[in-house]
Image: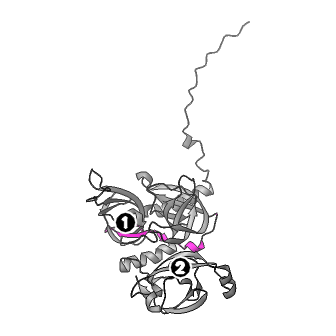
Amino acid sequence: MAQPERYEEPVELEATPESESRPPSEPLDAYSRAVIHAASRVGPSVVAIEVLLPEPTQGPGRQPGGPRGGSGSGFIFTPDGFILTNSHVVHGASKIHVTLPEGHRFPAELIGDDPDTDLAVVRIHAPNLVPARLGDSQSILVGQLVVAIGNPFGFQTTVTAGVVSALGRSLRSGSGRLIDNVIQTDAALNPGNSGGPLVTTGGEVVGVNSAVILPAQGICFAIAINTAKLVASQLIRFGRMRRSVIGIAGQNVVLPRRVTRYYRLVVESGVLVQSVQPGGAAERAGAREGDIIIGFGDDPIASIDQLQAKLTDQAAGVPRKLSVLRGVELQALEIIPAEA
């Protein structure tokens, strides 16, 4: 005898959200925990910076439509409102405004900027600010995980992660001076990230994001925080970065091999003095056009960049030995650099 068919009501299957597919007890992986920790520690200190540039009054560069604007990032590093950013973000701005992560917007004062290191300090007056903790850029290692936080294209508090790709890079600033000890990273940076922090997984700032190489991918640079500490302290104290000068214009030249062998020089190039400033330190020391500088103090000099690196504020007013080649004769002059 045939069995009657049984009728079963269809069972409706509920869609499980993707976020609920993981058991609540399952922990995050170590990489995610590290990035989340860094972002949560430093994120409240990262600000968006908007600038208004003065309208050109004359000449072919004048653009119709009023003043131009720009934007970038920065981060609070003191409880009383001092903010680190890039010089190219705020240089020449007529007005600066800073927006905090929670959305409050404040006018900012430019304390000082240094195009030679692409660093600047601005200040706002606001309550309950959260300063970022500054680390030691000498302690980081190639391959170490780092996190970049900024406002690319206006998307506020954007987090990207990568590694330290290389240390000790040199980067040419907009003023033409060489910036030393630059950090290379593959943490993605875009326009608007400039001035934001490069952070370790411990939540310490080790760099100020500054530049990308286009159209390459994953080649980005940050100014080391140890450099930023030095520059920021002088900008806050003096409104500018103090350096010394010797009063010459020069260019890099290769030394004749017979001269380097005869004097057993450790450099194969030097700085050819093209002109000497009247009344300057070099003229008082007896330097002449055509001299080739190969040493400053106890340090060999092979290029203009090396000479500029030695002309810090500590050199101003302090007698130093200037080693020059005059023809094929090696001479030692005593020079007293002046403050720029």
Q: In which quarter of the image is the N terminus?
A: top right
Q: What stretch is highlighted in magenta?
A: 119-144
- Within-10-Å neighbours for mark 2: few <14, some 14–19, many 20+: many
Give the camera-side residue of 121 and 177: 177
The residue located at (61%, 57%) in the rendering is: 31
34 lies above or below 298 = above
> What mark, if any, has residue 91 been given in the picture?
1
Give the residue pinned by disc 2. 272
Give the camera-side residue of 41 and 90: 90
User: Which badge, 1 or 2, comes first in the chain's sequence?
Assistant: 1
Q: Position of residue 310 (x, y in %)?
A: 52, 82
> What mark, if any, has residue 197 been given in the picture?
none
Residue 126 relative to residue 42: left or right? left
User: Is residue 101 in the magenta section?
Assistant: no
Instruction: Please name the amino acid that badge 1 sits on.
Output: His
Q: How far apart are marks 1 and 2 (CA)?
A: 32 Å
Query: Which SS does the magenta portion mostly show?
Result: loop
Q: Which residue of the protein is positioned furthest toward the front in this rendering? A: 327
